[in-house]
Image: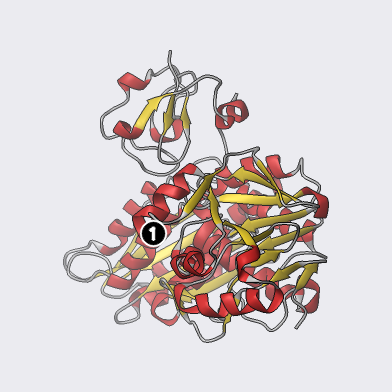
Amino acid sequence: MKRYACTVCSYGYDPALGDPENGIPRGTPFEDLPEDWRCPWCGAKKSEFVPEQEPPSEVHKERA
Amino acid sequence: MNRTLRENIDWVGHVDWTVRDFHGYDTARGATYNAYLVRDDQTALIDAVKAPYADELLGSIAALTDLSGVKFVVCNHAEPDHAGGLPRVMAALPNAALVCDKKCATALSQHHDTTGWKMRIVATGDTISLGRRTLQFLETPMVHWPESMFTYVPEEKLLFSMDAFGQHYATSQRFDDEVPLGTVMEEAKIYYANIVMPFGKQVAALLKKTAGLDIGMIAPAHGVIWRKHIPVILEAYQNWADCRPKPKVLVIYDTMWDSTGRMARAILAGASQPGVEAQLIHIRHSSLTRIATEVLDAAAVAFGSSTLNQGLMPMAGAVLTYLKGLRPVGKVGFAFGSHGWSGGGPEAVNEYLRAMKWEVPREPLKAQYRPTPNVLDECRAVGGMLAEKAREMAADRKVGGRQCNEP
């Protein structure tokens, strides 16, 4: 499953981790996030996210 | 006034003694906008000031060096209290390139006409050699804007931390060991609560990164410079980022005819237990800034509102809206209040407490017109329960509701 990065604040969405605080279970692909889901860091819309470039961002290294 | 941080590194900012309303933040002790000049083979200005003080900044630079010798202007943060003076500064420094990260360049171009500026875009890990000293950059997204950045000078063990570790504190002195530590820490706490609190996770991640830096001095963009009490401010940031509660119960309320006020005082009486700090805060006799600061390290919050026009008292609504945006994490919450014929105030409070994902151990406690002796007894009992929870949470370092800093 592909990781996505927020272009506004650099938050990385990792499908393996999901976003449990906001009701998104682990293992949820980015494509399956509800359209009203917002970046948990900065509140940006889903449309502000892009597939993450390799290598993974610093954010991800920390979250891994 | 001693403005010198290290040899040829000087403070060139502005002390704003009289500001009392900083975009709604109650700056009871005023503020400073810190800018720093690093003189070397090539000279760099670190950050600027609010627009009205740009000429004063240029005067301070000119007193130290020829303006044409400034080669770099580093912008760690695009917010107008630091970057507002940049158009004037860039126009007056003919040989300077503006140094910032990619997001900052965009943000600056959305604030100002930057078309004539020489730009040098940097990213985490990039360095610029000034000669004897080096500027090293570390992007710090969402501490507290997307484009925020730190600049580190390894040769001097000096970290320019922008808004992080800052305080709104006007003083003629520039260093933490020249002023009372209690005052600095109080202002640092107010600053964290009102500006940084929503970004606790990012702060925690950032503290891990900066732990790898050898830091002998932290020069923030507001307030005094940390050189003696660095471990104190770093530990405080760690505790705040980790949402560590104190054994503290707040009773925050607004009231029309003192029915909710009576309930609040009964809750306070119940919460006033040994080893627990209980505080009563009447919303209209306090301020958003002060309330957010007290909530930061409280374990439990009882929040009361009378019912006005089937809903919240308007200032109670303002406080709850402000708190919800600041995202205080890991509290126990309890809603209470009075109503006449309709109900609505305490229920609306409860919705906010749940929206903040606090632990809400019981339904709202309500009184119709006047709290009866039974209702007041119940208020005292709830106060005792909140005090007990607060004590446990502080002792076990547990939090209520949503957990802090979990991935």
- The residue drawn where x is 69% and y is 69% is B185
In the depicted view, which residue is nearer to us: B233 or B392?
B233
What amino acid type is highlighted by mark number 1? Ala
Q: What element carries label 1?
A: strand
Residue B45, relative to residue A8: is it above or below? below
Give residue A23's position: percent from left, percent from top.
38, 31
Tag count in the figure? 1
- The residue drawn where x is 57% and y is 68% is B190
Image quadrant assignment for residue B274: bottom right
Give residue B31's position: percent from left, percent from top.
56, 76
Assess disc 1: are there few (<14), some (14-19) or many (≥20) residues with their C-alpha within 10 Å of its C-alpha: many
In the depicted view, which residue is nearer to us: A38 or B17?
B17
Tell me the quadrant of the picture where the N terminus of chain B can be found.
bottom right
Give residue B365's position: percent from left, percent from top.
36, 60
Judged left or right of residue B5, residue B263 is left
Q: Identify residue for label 1.
A: B335
Image quadrant assignment for residue B305: bottom left
Residue B215, relative to residue A18: is it above or below? below
Give residue B332's position: percent from left, percent from top.
50, 52
- The residue drawn where x is 56% and y is 48% is B200
Please give the chain letter of the residue carrying mark 1: B
- The residue drawn where x is 47% and y is 35% is A11
Image quadrant assignment for residue B388: bottom right
Furthest toward the top, the residue is A1
Judged left or right of residue A51, residue B384 is right
Residue B12 in view here: yes
Residue B127, relative to residue B191: is it above or below? above
Judged left or right of residue B337, residue B293 is right
Residue B27 in view here: no
In the depicted view, which residue is nearer to us: B355 or B210?
B210
